Image: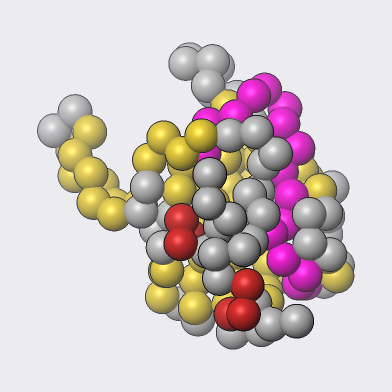
């Protein structure tokens, strides 16, 4: 099946979570910031899973946490703020396959996974792609 045909039907990247920040521009403590995706609060070391069949494009260590990028034809999904990863670059994945676990911020105690979808280099709103809450 095709990624585009599953818009509004994709499973969540975590089995239990709540969106705490959506896509868009925000001002936090006077600083303007922009989010390309969703921030989903979940529980400590929650498994993070891919939302659709694909192939791991990259696994990157970003300041002590990991980002996994999965390619689905002309679309990409990105999963950031992972404590650990269980996949490697080039690996083929199936829908809902575990790719790692979410990291917990030691200062706040919150476990938040960042999830984004891109068509090429352009971010698209992931909320309309996920199965409704």
Q: Nearer the viewer, residue 124 or 28?
A: 124
Q: Is residue 26 left or right of residue 107?
A: left
Is residue 39 visible in this depiction of the protein? Answer: yes
Residue 23 percent location from the top left of the image: 35, 53
Q: Quadrant of the N terminus?
A: bottom right
Is residue 64 visible in this depiction of the protein? Answer: no
Taking the spot 58% from the left edge, 80% from the top edge, the residue there is 4
Q: Nearer the viewer, residue 90 or 12?
A: 12
Q: Is residue 31 left or right of residue 42?
A: left
In the rendered image, the residue lying farthest to the front is 132
Residue 42 percent location from the top left of the image: 60, 29
Taking the spot 22% from the left edge, 33% from the top edge, the residue there is 28
Q: Is residue 80 above or below residue 118?
A: above
Taking the spot 42% from the left edge, 69% from the top edge, the residue there is 124
Q: Is residue 54 above or below residue 126?
A: below
Q: Is residue 46 above or below residue 91?
A: above
Q: Which residues are drawn in magenta?
A: 40-56
Q: Is residue 10 left or right of residue 93?
A: left
Residue 123 percent location from the top left of the image: 42, 69
Asked if the stretch drawn in magenta spans residue 55, the answer is: yes
Asked if the stretch drawn in magenta spans residue 114, the answer is: no
């Amino acid at each position: 099946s095709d990624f585009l045909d599953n818009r509004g039907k994709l499973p969540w990247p975590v089995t239990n979570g709540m969106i705490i920040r959506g896509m868009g521009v925000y001002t936090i403590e006077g600083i303007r910031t922009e989010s390309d995706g969703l921030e989903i609060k979940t529980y400590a070391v929650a498994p993070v899973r891919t939302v659709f069949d694909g192939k791991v494009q990259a696994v990157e260590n970003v300041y002590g946490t990991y980002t996994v990028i999965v390619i689905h034809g002309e679309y990409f999904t990105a999963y950031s703020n992972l404590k650990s990863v269980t996949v490697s670059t080039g690996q083929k994945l199936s829908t809902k396959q575990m790719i790692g676990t979410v990291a917990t911020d030691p200062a706040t105690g919150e476990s938040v996974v960042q999830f984004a979808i891109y068509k090429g280099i352009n971010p698209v709103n992931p909320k309309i792609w996920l199965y409704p809450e």
